[in-house]
Amino acid sequence: MKKYLPLILTLITSVSTGLLASGIAYSQSTPTPTPPSRSTRAQPQQRPAAGFDLAEYGVEFQADPRLIIMMAALEAAGLDPVANGRQPSAFRSQVRKDLATLDPDLRSRLRAFYERTKLPAPATAADQAARYVSLALTLGPPPSLDAPERSDDLPGGLLEVLDFAPLVREFYRRSGIDERLVSYTRAYQAEGDRLRAPAAELIRSVLTYLHTRPITISSERVLVNAGGKKKNNARTYTMREHVRRFFIVPDLLAVPGAINFRVIGDEYYAIVPEGTDPVSSELRRAYLQYVIDPLMLRFNREIAGRREQIKQIISEREKSGATVTPDVFIVVARSLVAAADARFEESRKLEALSRETRGKLDGAQDDASRAAIVRETRAAMSDIQDDAVSKLADDYEHGALLAFFFADQLKGIESTGFDIANFFVDMISSFDPVRESRRLGENAEARQRARAAREARLAARKAEAEVPVAYSGAETARASSLVKKLSEIEGILRLKDYLNAETRLKQLLTDYPREPRIFFALAQTASLAAVDATDENVQAERLNRALGNYRLAVQAASADTDHPLLCRAHEAMGRIHSFMDNTGEAAKEFDEAIKICDPRGTTYNDAVEGKKLSQP
């Protein structure tokens, strides 16, 4: 192992793990000191105190009643995002049931508006819904739901559906949704609770990578009315502060898989569909924009100083037939967001590859095996780097004309441990417009390799899916029925109806005895119910019930076919034992999870972190 360790260390780029705590005092309208250059000896920022309060980093979860009402009205109007052959979620089914008695005339007018303003093919259901999401975020709170005044300042898409607002107000008054809004909001809050932990890990990871913390307060210079009418009256100004916030808004009626991102003044909204995994979604890119946008204002003079060079790159792209915004500040912002997103993803994958490679080398029996592992690692590393290049090229074609440049710069500073803002002046002043105009050509080969690799992976998955399964038709139908029923019960859990979920799961056991997925779901149900318990004895009883069902799931599971379930069950038991101060049992469960979980997965990382925290 020692023989190969230096080589592995040169192959793998590690990621710094310290989250930076100290921020930069910032005002959007007053000059700020010039950040130190690379030659200046800067001091690394401090690690944060224990705990991670998302509110400190501008993040809030919001169950927005305007969005709930709007999407329910769209449901009545005929928007159907459920794919053919799929069953609607438990919440969507409940809303449809609640709207069954809606006045036919109102439903007809809602549908007529939706059909009249429908986007032409090939627009998707997500495209149809996006404009109405924008409208929802501009409405006043219920019951008035006041619409914004018609103005050329409103986005074109929103203007197209602005006249839907009076129908939404009527829908609110006549559909009975005002009486159901409390229960609907509770379901949205439950989805927000599900998103909280993975979103916190995502935010922590992004800020760790950038070695910064977001600017959550901005200042605006506002003219004060002097009160006089004479032309020679001196003008006076005052500073007004704004809180910048990043809202994560669950949407149980959204089109599956389609995150909507909106910026309204200093408020950023990421509207997240039910079941979304925040770590592997556009949520990361949205938060990167929240972090990076104020830097464009802070360093607007430096960006303006390079205006002609940026316009030169824009002109070269336009000559090739591309449509690019003429706004140099938008080009820089898009480029830095794209570069940070691509480099973050590349670094995360390389870190996982490093862990996996070290594990394989530890278990290798001879030099030949170790050499094979190194060759495999080199190939995997090349694929990861090609994927990053392909992603940057795609963003370049969509207007992020400095994406490759910023990615190169980030690669040089990401392991320093210093705030990205300290280097921005140096970065923006050092690019060569001629070089940046040639980036697509320079990286065409790597991009082609990435496309070929993706096509090969898709073909392999398709071939695997087409392999005949040695199950009878009856067995296949039975397995499909179980998956459907468990999915329905998962929807019930999101509504926090634990008793109903547990009853239905126990009924399933009569048809599917010794089914590990049912035991696992029973354990999850008891664990979630324990979170809501206020009595310590009730909480302890539910946690012990969860442990018992997790053990039954482990006993019934097969190491060959239920590997992910076993991994998650052991990690969950470790967390429960740790909460109950059973440190010895917690360590055993975490050790078992670490042994069997995929080192690239989040459950593996959770088990490692859990073991550290559970140790005395």
Image (cartoon, rainbow, N blue to C red):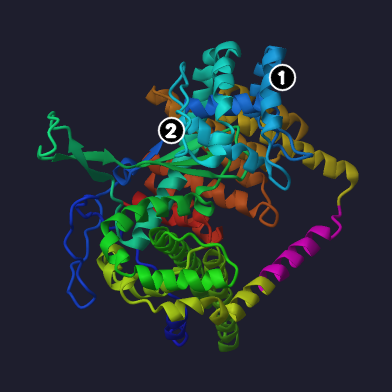
Q: Position of residue 112 (x, y in %)?
A: 71, 25
- In the depicted structure, whether residue 597 falls above or below residue 495: below
Element type at mark 1: helix
Nearer the camera: disc 1 or disc 2: 1
Q: Is residue 405 left or right of residue 25?
A: right
> Of the residues shown, which amino acid type is indicated by label 2?
Gln
Per the image, is 549 magenta? Answer: no
Q: Earlier in the sequence, mark 1 or mark 2?
A: 2
**Marks 1 and 2, how far apart at CA:** 31 Å
Relative height, residue 187 to residue 200 (above, below): above
Q: Nearer the viewer, residue 348 or 605?
A: 348
In this orientation, which residue lies closer to the viewer: 233 or 582?
233
184 and 35: which is toward the camera: 35
The residue at which mark 1 appears reads as: 108
Report the span colored magenta: 453-470
Which of the 4 image quarters holds residue 36?
Answer: bottom left
Q: Mark 2 = which residue?
A: 62
The answer to whether residue 274 is visible is no
Please name the amino acid that badge 1 sits on.
Answer: Ser
Left/right placement of residue 137 relative to residue 507 reads left
Residue lying at 53% horizontally and 64% vertically, measured from the top left: 395
Residue 590, image x, y percentages: 46, 53
